[in-house]
Amino acid sequence: MIQPGAIRRVLVVRLSAIGDIVLTTPLLAELHRALPQARIDFCTKAPFAPLVASNPAVSSVVTPESITPGAAYDLVVDLQNNRRSRALIRKLRAGEVTRYHKKNWKKLLLVQFKINVSDGYQSVVERYGEALDGLAPKVTAPCALHPSPEDRAFAASSIGKDGPVLAVCFGANHFTKRYPLERFARVIEIVTAETPARVLLLGGKEDEPEAAKLKAMLPDMARSRVLSLAGKASLMQSAALLASVDVVLTNDTGLMHIASAFGKKLFVIFGSSVKEFGFMPWGAEYELFETPGLKCRPCSHIGRATCPKGHFRCMMEIAPERIASRIIETLNQSSP
């Protein structure tokens, strides 16, 4: 058991990626609550630093390149737990080191043999909390992001106030996590035909060409209600945009977790992903669309470049009409 009174300097390490880092923010809140006297630094890769730079629990953000060799910390919480994070920590003067246990053997059993040995659902957030070694009895804080006033002004000027807005996060790093574009287009077509909602397309620079393809699939009326800021908004500008919309339709991607930080109603599409991996939205209301009962699912714990079976049933059997119906019902319920 860690003795909190002796801890004055803490380093939390999570090098990547967007969703994983957003899911550390409940732990940061609990850590700050348990150690109000301590300085808490966060180490991550430079592109992800904005996610925690304005977090009130964090004193400073460092990168693997900028952290001072030999820097002294009373406690290091390694939430990455791989060769790179271990090598980084060995260069420090670390008192107590605790680590997040990934339990990859459970993922291997589930992916390779479809054997689920988990005793009920456990979020990665809760497993991160175990790395605090008793400092916080239970992680209950929500995810939290803090866009700047400039980021929020960008969002306000981009979206305006003319009716409800549906954000669509259509990208993902791996093919088997991406709902097909033509099916996203069908959802958007139905929603815009039956509600006054406008649609905001969000994603990174790599998603910009796909956003153009998606818009081109839409009939003129639907296309006129779609604004694409994929590749045009920074990470925290995207966060501010998600804070400003009404509902979010998303693949299993980092933007899903960003949206969860603002309590948005999420419509989540899982293909090769399964909730047993622990990466469901934390502390936000969501509806999950998936194809249960497939013997080939999950085929990977991170996603694949192609469907190994060639049929992609995990995504193709999720009807866009069903998704659109739930979004429309939610928008109608929330309208004045």
Image (cartoon, rainbow, N blue to C red):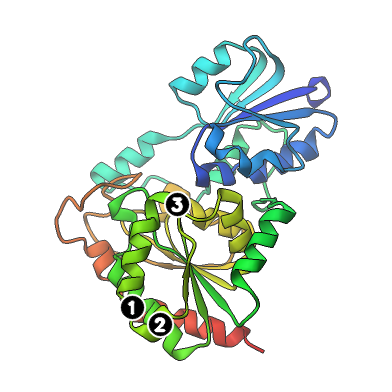
Residue 292 is drawn in which quadrant?
bottom left
Residue 77 shown left or right of residue 60 in the figure: left
Q: Which residue is mark 3?
A: 204
Q: Secondary structure at mark 3?
A: loop
Is 158 in front, or is 256?
158
Lower position in the chain sequence, tag 1 or tag 3: 3
User: Which quarter shows the N terminus?
Assistant: top right
At label 2, the amino acid type is Ala
Q: Residue at x 45, y 90 (%)?
A: 194
- Residue at 37 percent across and 82 percent down: it is 189
Q: Is residue 157 above or below residue 75?
A: below
In the image, residue 59 above or below residue 122:
above
Q: Which residue is mark 2?
A: 222
Report which residue position mark 1 lands on: 218
* Type of amino acid at the residue the image marks with label 3: Gly
When the figure is inspected, residue 40 is found, relative to residue 50, above or below; the finding is above
Measured Cα–Cα span from mark 2 to mark 3: 22 Å
**Mark 2 / mark 3, whichever is N-terminal:** 3
Report whether residue 318 is seen. Answer: no
Q: Is residue 110 at least partly visible in the picture?
A: yes
Circle 2/circle 1 CB separation < 8 Å: yes
